[in-house]
Amino acid sequence: MKIREIRAMRGPNYWSVNRHKLIVMVLDIEEMEQRPTNTIDGFLERLKAMFPSMQEHRCSVGTPGGFFERVEEGTWIGHVIEHIALELQTMAGMDVGFGRTRGYGEEGVYNVVFAYMEEEVGKYTAKASVRIAEALIENKEYDLAEDIQHMRELREEVRLGPSTGSIIEEAESRGIPWIRLNKYSLCQLGYGKNQKRIQATVTSQTSNIGVDIAGDKEETKYLLEQAEVPVPKGEIIRSEAGLKEAVDYVGYPLVLKPIGGNHGRGITTNIMNLDDALVAFKAAKEVSRSVIVEKYITGEDFRLLVIDHKLVAAAIRTPAHVVGDGKSTVQALIDKVNEDPRRGYGHEEMLTMIDVNPLTMSILEEKGLTLDAVLPKGEMLKLKNTANLSTGGTAEDVTDMVHPFNIFMAERISKIIDLDICGIDIMTTDIGKPLPDTDGAVLEVNAGPGFRMHLAPTKGLPRNVAGFVIDMLYKPGSTSRIPIIAVAGTNGKTTTTRLIAHMARMKGYKVGYTTTDGVYIQNRLLMTGDCTGPTSAEFVLKDPTVDFAVLESARGGLLRAGLGFKNCDIGIVTNVAADQLGLKGIHTIDQLARVKGVIPEIVFPDGYAILNADDDRVYDMRKNVKSNVALFSLDEKNKRMTKHAKAGGLSAVYENGFITICKGEWKMRVTKAINVPLTFQGKATFMIQNVLPAVLTGYIRGFSIEDIKVAIESFIPSPSQTPGRLNLFKFNNFEVLLDYAHNPAGLRALQQMIEKMDGSPKIGMIAGIGDRRPEDNYEVGVVAAETFDEIIIRQDKNLRGKTESELIKMIHDGIKSVDPNKPVTIIPSEKEAITFAITNAKKGSLLVFCSDVVPDALNLVMSFKEEETKELYKLTKEDIPNLV
């Protein structure tokens, strides 16, 4: 078997608009296409032996054991690999259940689709599942445990930590979108100007000074002492020479810890002699240059969590430990503790397994013990010197037991250190009494404290502390979102996107928008190229200056990784026509419509799906949406529009020469189409079709009819405003029209306009595209032959899998089917083709250039126009900008 491709969906996608995290593996099962599972001797038995828990897989049968029934009856190996991938992840602690296996459109090739929790683990699982299936087919031994352990380790490397993860989960539960900004824990909550950031439990509102102070234990202790907060007596030393003096001053028992340490690194507690103090000093020096020598306060270790200067949780922490039973060795006791189902690898469970590391061995050595020692019954042995959960410690919630004085003190400390989120470590014999009354002390103040002990304590009530973080970042009445308008369709997407962006800009919004030409932030081009995928969408949504997003969303990015956003306020589908069929397993127009239909399906329930009522497939998308529906049409008498109007629906229509918004059966005429520059005095009917969803968008967003009118009448088709979309250049003796039309449907629409234009002869420059079907390139030739008096065939820079001669023949065959005698010139280079056409243009002619690389073609045409202007006025290039 051969894996052709593995893609990770990260947002709404062709396979599911609700399940965003999916692996799509394109798998060629080769000769296994002829060998269903019931023809492989012993396959089912081996599968059951390796994965007995697959008994729970119901599959299409719908009952436990249903999948095994399918295997027994005979199913294809791609289907088996899907179930292996799901079960393998579950065995590694990542319980996922969604899967699909569907034909790719080629014999023996399948899309194997399954859910994942962590992308890198999902990709690994895809490959491992194929290896496992091959081993089962060939009856070979396979080490499943090795894969499972690797998946666990990989998950720990790439996943968000439990604290960050809890904040993200809470945000998701409130409908707050988020984006992971790096491979660590830096995440963005919200979009555009309403974004906030978190990194672990440090937020974009956290004081940098506060973090610095908390990171400096000497400074923290000084400030707390000045504020009469109980802290341990202590000294700061930097060399062994000062150690004895500090020990004499503070007195035993001692604790030594590095100034800038965290997570318990370099800390040694309960030191009773100078020799041990020297060892502890050296350990602390490995972490920081300065070391704190403090009085060791006896009592229990408490953590108080303060968020937004309010105490929200408290826990008593106990280091990793075992309790003797009088007969088991220390190692056996550790193994028994690790059998607790609540303990797992890393952060996969509420508790972490206890590992035996050098620190553990040194603690045992200090006590004269080994791992083979047997502890007396009831004796507790601490295996770590700090109570962190990440090293196997435990925690018990005591929030409701904290004395009011201690609450007051903790909240005051958060303001003294100036931290919006802080963990305060206290040593006391009783948290239910004021700290001074127990001779307790504040040991540390931590910026970015862990939440795990509060979210899932070993004992006591779990506390949703992440909720307080979200409450702090997004106060009542604030929003995390910005308006998102998503535009899909085969043709017209870019123009519609640009017009909506122009309209919003005129209303004072700071707009970010994506197009096939690039990404624009406040009308400045910041990324070039085809930017209609999820990465470009996220680029806009991550920009902190943007307060209105218009996102052109094309099939390529959606099939490659899904959408870069989960929901939108308005989703537009302009049309669906045959284009790029045969790519990524999309072979029919109905499949293509399903891809485009993702956009209206993700519109918020109170938003609008704006659909083309003149396109059967687009109109049918209304059946799958959860939002309001608005329709647009070039035909006022369209029965669909009439029915929609009678039902009180919102629509836009071209009627009696007017662009009109209809609310129910009431008409609100915006302006005559001839007044809209995009329509070229009404000649470009397809441009009117692009204007209609744009005016609907403006109306839905609350723009007045007058504002909409001004916007569409001021939107001029030009190289800067609409590059490659009906850019008309009037030369002295001829005209040049440059357009992006690149498929039969786009060329048909352009044909209707060209027929209404003056100019003779009409000369068209067209090209075949390598990743289109032969019949699509043939159809381009047919339409060109019907439209133009003469034709120039050129080629794209990227032939996309076809040869130059193959593409030229497809186009030429289409031309000859209409008119065998049609004058055709073949010039492969676009630059040379444009140069040839302009330098040989006849007086009164109309040259139409259909370009795929718009910037290059535009620059070339504009350079010829510039040269003509220089010649006409006898000016140098430097003088041209001074023309009035």
Image: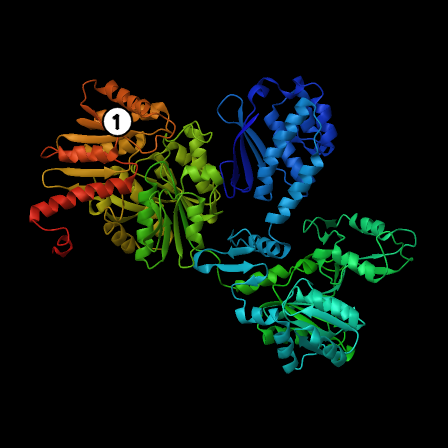
As drawn, is 647 to the left or to the right of 304?
A: left
What's under tag 1, amino acid-wise?
Answer: Val
Q: Is residue 293 visible?
A: yes
Q: Secondary structure at mark 1?
A: helix
As drawn, is 59 to the left or to the right of 674?
A: right
Q: Is residue 115 visible?
A: no
- Answer above or below: position of 539 versus 109: below
Of residues 798 and 19, which is closer to you in this image?
A: 798
As drawn, is 346 to the left or to the right of 599?
A: right
Q: Position of residue 75 (x, y in %)?
A: 62, 23
Q: Position of residue 647 (x, y in %)?
A: 40, 42
Residue at 32 percent across and 48 percent down: it is 498
Count of numbered circles in the view = 1
Q: Position of residue 690 (x, y in %)?
A: 30, 42
Of residues 204 and 4, which is closer to you in this image?
A: 4
Residue named by callout 1? 783
Q: Position of residue 142 (x, y in %)?
A: 70, 30
Q: Quadrant of the C terminus?
A: bottom left
Q: Quadrant of the N terminus?
A: top right
Colour option used: rainbow
Of residues 259 and 672, which is closer to you in this image?
A: 259
**Residue lying at the far front of the rendered structure:** 241
Q: Residues within 10 Å of mark 1 (few under 14, many from 20)?
A: many
Q: Quadrant of residue 508?
A: bottom left
Of residues 285 and 858, which is closer to you in this image?
A: 285
